[in-house]
Amino acid sequence: MRADARCGKMARFLASAGIMPRPDQRPVGVFDSGVGGLTVLKAMREAMPHEDLLYLGDTARLPYGTKSAASVLRYAHRAAEHLIGYDIKMLVIACNTASAVALDDLQRDLAPLPVVGVVKPGARAAVAARPAARHLVLATEATVRLGAYSRALAEIDEHAEVSEMACEMLVAQAEEGWTEGAVAEAIVRAYLDPVLGSAAKPDSLILGCTHFPILRGVIRSVVGADMSIVDSAVTTASLVQERLRSGGIGGAAGRTGSLRLLATDGGRRFAQVGGTFLGEPLSTEAVEIVDI
Ligand code: DGL
């Protein structure tokens, strides 16, 4: 018997004996402005293969990163309300822009539903990788405007130095799947060369946008081997796992969780582009179009 199956059997026994909380089989709701949040979903599936996951990509309103905070807040509320209709047990905002704008609001308005964002886990990952570092955050215009990473880093590491750079072109580049080659490198260089050649050269790069992890290879080739490069996917997945455990709302171990994908527009494109972010091919039929 596999270890996770043994765990599942043990958990069911302890639950039936009233020693452990009963497994909570409600899905975890995850949303992003589009397909970028699938990088977070991928890490969640790897960390919690037994949980049912429900993902909503608000592709009709993408990108969030160039919109006003008021619009992003409205979109985030709509996405959250839609997912709540599926009786979710936790909400994960798998979008840096929406986390920067709407995390506090959604946590307050949806309580007691646990709501997790990606900015703080990303900041924690960066400090763990390199304490007292000079961080450069690559993000969308809206995330940079709100200084969300600067605040999150200051809370964790008083010695951290932070600058933030809006890189909207990298969002389009990731969506186009230009993850390598001369054009991909030229775009990354256009953003990074000026800082790499400056006296304030960073030693830590934070990928503060869900689209950027798929550009990690080309970014690495531009910045060289010494700079730390972090994103928030794995640390967000760990935080979700910990919150499910501490809240007594984890699903039964030893089973294979389901994955349901919703999008507000363009199932074919979602499947095509999303496959790269999720790391496995997606079919158009696997994507349900919803109106929110
Ligand atoms: N998901 C967004 C983020 O992480 C990037 C794409 C967008 O601008 O909507 O900030």
Image (tube, grey):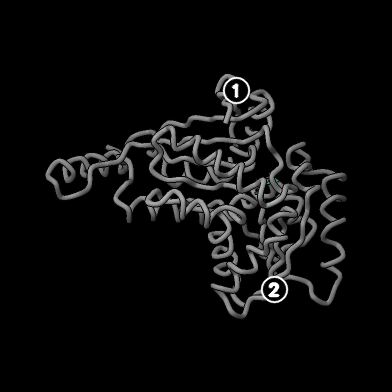
Q: Is mark 1 within 8 Å of ligand 1?
A: no
Horizontal and vertical percent position of residue 124: 54, 65
Q: Residues within 10 Å of mark 1 (few under 14, many from 20)?
A: some
Q: Residues within 10 Å of mark 2 (few under 14, many from 20)?
A: some
Horizontal and vertical percent position of residue 57: 60, 36
Q: Quadrant of residue 163?
A: bottom right
Report which residue position mark 1 lands on: 283
Horizontal and vertical percent position of residue 105: 52, 54
Residue name at image x 69 percent, y 45 percent: 64
In the rendered view, does 73 fall on the left or right side of 212? left
Residue name at image x 76 percent, y 50 percent: 218
SS at circle 2? strand
Q: Amino acid at mark 2?
A: Arg
Image quadrant for the N terminus? top left
Give 213 or 21, whichever is nearer the viewer: 21
Give 37 or 72, whichever is nearer the viewer: 72
Reply above or below: 143 against 269.
Answer: below
In the rendered view, does 77 fall on the left or right side of 162? left
Reply above or below: 272 against 12.
Answer: above
Report which residue position mark 2 lands on: 134
Image quadrant for the C terminus? top right
Q: Amino acid at mark 1?
A: Ser
